[in-house]
Amino acid sequence: MISRYVPMGLLCILLFFSCNTINIKENTIEDEDPVPLLIEEFSSNPQKLLEKILELDSKYQSKYSILISRLYLSLGEYINCEDSIQTIPQFESSVECLEILSICEYSQGRDATDLLEQLIALDITNSIGNKLLINTLISSRDLENAEKILKTYFENGGHDDFSYIALGDIALVKVENLGLEKKKVLSSLEEKIIYGYYKDALENYKKIESSNDPSYYVKLSNIYKKLGKRMDAVEAMSVAIQLEPQNEWNYYDRGRLYFYLDAPERAKKDFLSALNINPDHFFSNIFLGRLYFMSGENTVSKKYYLKALEITPDYLPAYKDLSVLFMVEGDNNTGLKYLKKLYNSKSDPDELLPLYLVDSLINNNEMKEAQNLLEKLVKYEKNSTMKRLYQYYLSPSSSGDQILNDILHLDNNTQRLRLTYYVASILEREGVKFASSSLFGEVRDSYNGFESMLSLYKLGEINE
């Protein structure tokens, strides 16, 4: 799963340990033992408590070695924690020691499977061991064993929030294991299977009445989104924001939901909130660039796009909008620089990108390069309509006027409006200003893509 949606069991476990670090009573405490008084005095300061115990005679350090290990663990000092545990005689047969060692290994990203299996062998009902092992198996996509251990844990009384979250996570990983992320068109059977898994995940997540963990609501929102319930997804993300208001990703995720719900002002507000927390949040800059581009606020749009490219210079999807923004400002050379990089990368699936490049080269009087590109496009283009249009660009003539008429009567309205821009551009170059102005106006008023902004710019030129 996406790293943002990490297994929640570990978070709960670490929270448990950090909250209970000092609530440990050793089996024997002598009257003159100073440690209980230290615990009472520094109960809210694990760092100071640890320092004070380490200042004591070695016999107390030996006596309270598990407490010292837990304090190291709560402070994230995993190496010291491991060293402390391993000084305890027969630590390999102690449930408490194995718990602490397992968390140390897990927290450092190491494979703690052997330790966890050893721990569960000593205590089959051990909550820490079962939860960490189940999370490990889910992360490694070993769902068969994860489900097996989860079933045993359930049978031994593990009817808690973790169990339901784990069942939900297993369903989500089953979706990933289908390997359909890059498939553009799913069969009805594949859609049914995926929907079923997401529905299972939602049912298990909804068994939790409430949670104070923001990552729970982030994952719940993602499940709602996958099931097409975008308003429920927004509601879940709003709770995540309430619980964790300084996490820029929460605002970004909700802003993206608003973006696809066609609520641009709410989306802008959330993306700006993300940037208030982290001005270098790449995706919020990209979405703001796009939103301001769509609303025709060119200067603001360019600011956010250029900021995004400072962070990730090779993010090619931004190049198309930037090429338009520079061109409408009259900087055709910079606009063409971005456009050529995008075209040469062969990463943009837009079938009209070559036509946009040809038209831009002609507008910038780079006729030789435009002709060379057109000759290649005519040679290799398989779509008959596009092939005839390229031929017309290459050699305009009255006999080719029929292709312009055909384009203006295409059934696909979006395709028709986009191609209308290029027809209008041809007519403008041929001096047919009234017709070209009328067609540019139609594209400007009826279409929200980059050809619409170019049409607005063209109309300004014609009317000067």
Image (cartoon, rainbow, N blue to C red):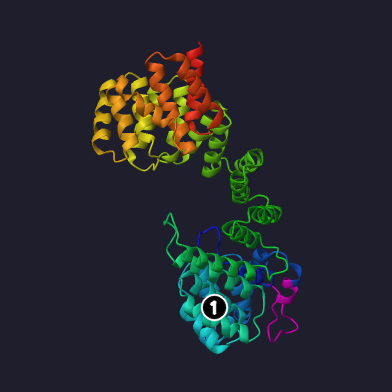
Is residue 403 something that shows in the picture?
Answer: yes
Q: Quadrant of residue 330?
A: top left
| Residue 288: image location, x then y, percent | 57, 37
Question: Where 262 falls versus 187 (above or below)?
Answer: above
Report whether 241 appears left or right of 182. Answer: right
| Residue 82: image location, x then y, percent | 52, 74
Number of on-image labels: 1
Is residue 80 something that shows in the picture?
Answer: no
Q: Is residue 25 magenta?
A: yes
Q: Pick the residue in front: 78 or 170.
A: 170
| Residue 402: image location, x then y, percent | 35, 26
Report whether 282 appears left or right of 208. Answer: left
The type of residue carrying mark 1 is Ile
| Residue 25: image location, x then y, percent | 70, 81
Q: Pick the residue in front: 159 or 256.
A: 256
Report whether 372 appears left or right of 30. Answer: left
Q: Quadrant of residue 409?
A: top left
- By secondary structure, the bulk of the magenta-drawn segment is best described as loop
Question: Where 16 falls versus 94 (above or below)?
Answer: above
- Read off the magenta span: 22-39
Q: Pick the residue in front: 269 or 432.
A: 432
Q: Quadrant of residue 178?
A: bottom left
Q: Which residue is denoted by mark 1 in the rendering? A: 85
Determine whether the residue tagged by mark 1 lies in a helix, strand or loop: helix
Q: Is residue 255 magenta?
A: no
Q: Residues within 10 Å of mark 1 (few under 14, many from 20)?
A: many
Residue situated furthest top in the rendering? 464
